[in-house]
Image (tube, grey):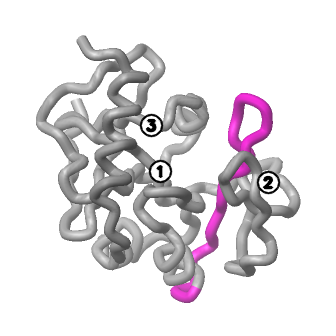
Amino acid sequence: MKDKAQMRERYRRERSEAFVPAVYSNVLASPEVTRATVIASYVSYGHEPSTVELNRALIKSGKTLLLPRVNKDRIDWIYWDGDAEKLVEKKKILEPVGEVISTLPAIDVVIVPALRIDRDGYRLGQGGGYYDRALPMMSGWKIALVHSGEVTSEILPRESHDIAVDAAATPDLIVRFKKN
């Protein structure tokens, strides 16, 4: 079995060599997002699929948008209204400023980053484990954004705390995974 750290390094290199900005309008048109009221997303960085236009479109369509802010070993969630001045850089990542939501509302959709997604919906993230700790507490539809070619038929290494997503979106399609 390949080491997760080696896989992350390889996939980051491949991603940086093939980086092309893309729009994820298919996510906006999905029935889960169309019906949603509250959506948790993230601010992309580096060669991740860009969430800039997606997040703006979600807000413009009247959705309540939550963004993550790292707090030690966990993620806190902050309401974000689309104001770029309410984002500050912390360790190369833009995070929202504002009050932490003490009691999370019902979150209908959770949009998460990933380097790769396997055929069962398990993601290989950046290695910090933040989403591994956050996702079990979130009951909404979970979708990972990846570039074309980053949904793989191979089975990625898994640990007991790994949580599968419900779907993965590339710029061209949404792959939905069956739940066991």
Left or right, 140 with reference to 72? left
Q: Give residue 95's mark.
A: none
User: Which circle, 1 or 2, is nearer the viewer?
Assistant: 1
In the figure, 147 relative to 166: above or below? below
* Residue at mark 2: 101
Looking at the picture, how far across and down is residue 128, in whole percent? 58, 30
State yes or no: residue 67 in magenta: yes
Which is more toward the observer, 104 or 94? 94
As helix, strand or loop, the secondary structure at mark 2 comes to loop
User: What is the residue that sits farthest to the top in this orientation?
Assistant: 1
* Residue at mark 3: 125
Amino acid at pointer 1: Val
* Residue at mark 1: 112
Q: Calculate the distance from the C-alpha at mark 1 to the C-alpha at mark 3.
A: 9 Å
Q: Earlier in the sequence, mark 1 or mark 3?
A: 1
Looking at the picture, how far across and down is residue 114, in whole percent? 40, 45
